Image (cartoon, helix red, strand yellow):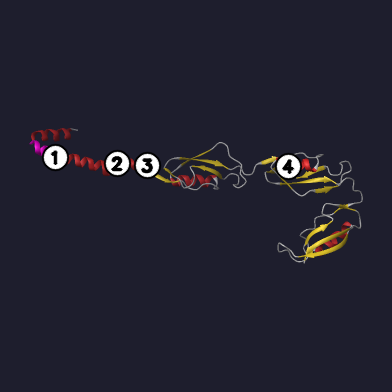
């Protein structure tokens, strides 16, 4: 401050023109310093930006590390969201989105995946097959192949139980099989599912059950199955048959 006063006092003693020129030079020097030195410093501090990294699908630790290395902060939402695609514990959603240009130091909000949502399997005992299928579908589950089971007291066509049972949980999209009563089936045996087995291996199983081999039809496979692979049976699997019943087969030629 004292130096500046001294300069001003000195200028007052100088001729007007010379003093004016000196003032001009000083103003130019000050403008240059502000433009080339001070402004870039402030502008850089205020407008430094970077690209937001891709975080969706990353673990919590890897997502936080990626943000810190890129110069951003992070904040996790209190509640996660269910997802059928992103495993539980991974980043499901990020805001701003990956690839956006944002100021360094900005907070990126992260939402964690809770994985597939679990639901209670409804108790369907005593329901009709149609009612059971509707209940399973409404719960977000998939109706699997129907299984027939013998039962003395539950009438034919009524649900005995489900697989998995009603005391268990399943994830949305899981398959639930319905066990339907075949009524009283004293002396009868259920025909298993032989599809995918080689016909030679089926013979012994049929003998153990007390059944006989009926007609065998051969046809070309559609999915690259090996020759001799069982495609279907008649009667169908799950049917209860009396002893010595004949079972017909369709196998791959």
Tell me: 33 left or right of 234. Answer: left
Would you say the residues marked 2 and 1 are in contact, meaning their CB atoms lie under 8 Å apart? no
Mark drawn on residue 39? 2
| Residue 171 placement: quadrant | top right
Tell me: 49 left or right of 155. Answer: left
Mark drawn on residue 136? 4
Depth check, front residue: 103 or 5: 103
Q: Which comes sooner in the sequence, label 4 or label 2? A: 2
Query: Label 3's element?
Result: helix
Q: Which comes sooner in the sequence, label 3 or label 4? A: 3
Mark drawn on residue 47? 3
Tell me: 83 left or right of 37. Answer: right
Query: Label 2's element?
Result: helix
Would you say the residues marked 1 and 3 are in contact, meaning their CB atoms lie under 8 Å apart? no
Q: Indicate yes or no whether the magenta region holds residue 22.
A: yes
Task: Answer above or below: position of 16 versus 59.
Answer: above
Write down the region rendered in magenta. Answer: 15-24
Q: Which comes sooner in the sequence, label 1 or label 4? A: 1
Tell me what residue is drawn at x 22 percent, y 40 percent: 30
Indicate the position of residue 24 as horizontal and vertical percent values.
16, 40
Q: Which residue is mark 1?
A: 22
Query: Label 4's element?
Result: helix
């Amino acid at each position: 401050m004292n130096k500046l006063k001294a300069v001003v006092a000195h200028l007052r003693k100088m001729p007007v023109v010379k003093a004016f020129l000196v003032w001009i030079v000083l103003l130019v020097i000050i403008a240059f310093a502000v433009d080339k030195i001070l402004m870039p410093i402030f502008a850089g501090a205020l407008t430094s930006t970077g690209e937001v990294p891709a975080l969706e699908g990353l673990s919590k630790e890897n997502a936080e590390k990626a943000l810190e290395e890129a110069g951003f902060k992070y904040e996790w939402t209190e509640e996660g969201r269910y997802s059928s695609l992103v495993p539980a514990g991974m980043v499901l959603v990020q805001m701003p989105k990956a690839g956006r240009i944002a100021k360094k130091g900005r907070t990126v909000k992260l939402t964690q995946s809770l994985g597939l949502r679990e639901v209670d399997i409804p108790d369907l005992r005593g329901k009709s097959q149609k009612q059971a299928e509707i209940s399973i579908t409404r719960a977000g589950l998939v109706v699997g192949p129907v299984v027939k089971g013998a039962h003395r007291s539950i009438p034919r066509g009524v649900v005995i139980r489900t697989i998995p049972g009603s005391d268990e949980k399943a994830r949305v999209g899981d398959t639930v099989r319905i066990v339907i009563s075949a009524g009283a089936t004293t002396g009868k045996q259920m025909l298993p599912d032989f599809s995918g087995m080689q016909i030679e291996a089926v013979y012994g199983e049929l003998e153990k059950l007390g059944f006989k081999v009926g007609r065998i039809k051969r046809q070309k496979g559609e999915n690259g199955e090996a020759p001799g692979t069982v495609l279907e049976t008649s009667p169908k699997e799950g049917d209860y048959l009396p002893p010595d019943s004949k079972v017909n087969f369709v196998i791959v030629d």
